[in-house]
């Protein structure tokens, strides 16, 4: 048996202005204390979803594959020999 309780009277949504303002306030506090930095990181990306993937998602169904373009690079000098 699964019991699911939903509180529709005291819910909150992240799109509420008071919620968004509280998040910006916290971010500014962290920024003012020097705890925020700008950096760059290579992220796995899903072209199907157009979103970055988590490390867990990118590790699922991982397979080593042979790139057919590598064979074309090896053959290209032979094609231009004529």
Image (tube, helix red, strand yellow):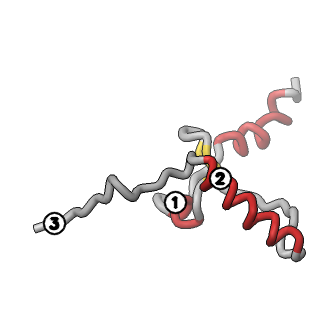
In front: mark 1 or mark 2?
A: 2
Q: Which residue is mark 3?
A: 2
Q: How dense is the environment of label 1, judged by Cα within 10 Å: few (below 14), some, or many (20 and up)?
A: few
Crowding at mark 3 (Cα within 10 Å: few <14, some 14-19, many 20+):
few
Mark 1 or mark 2: name the one nearer the start of the chain. 2
Residue 11 relative to residue 57: left or right: left
Q: Nearer the viewer, residue 62 or 8?
A: 8
Q: CA distance from mark 3 to mark 2?
A: 33 Å
Residue annotated with mark 2: 20
* Quarter residue 71 falls in: top right
Q: Which disc number belongs to residue 57?
A: 1
Q: Quadrant of residue 38?
A: bottom right
Asked whether the beta carbons under mark 1 and mark 2 sit within 8 Å of each other, the answer is no
Q: Is residue 25 above or below residue 8?
A: below
Q: CA distance from mark 1 to mark 2?
A: 28 Å
Query: Residue 50 placed where, x, y %?
Result: 61, 40
- Position of residue 39 relative to residue 50, above or below, is below
Q: Earlier in the sequence, mark 3 or mark 1?
A: 3
Mark 3 vs mark 1, foreground winner is 3
Label 3 vs label 2, nearer the camera:
2
- Mark found first going from the N terminus, 3 or 2: 3
- The answer to which of 78 and 29 lies nearer the viewer is 29
């Amino acid at each position: 048996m699964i019991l699911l309780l939903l509180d529709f009277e005291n819910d909150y949504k992240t799109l509420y202005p008071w919620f968004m303002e509280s998040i910006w306030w916290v971010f500014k506090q962290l920024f003012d204390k020097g705890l925020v930095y700008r950096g760059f990181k290579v992220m796995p990306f899903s072209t199907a979803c157009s979103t970055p993937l988590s490390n867990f998602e990118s590790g699922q169904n991982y397979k080593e594959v042979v790139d057919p373009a590598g064979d074309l690079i090896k053959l290209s000098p032979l094609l231009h020999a004529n």
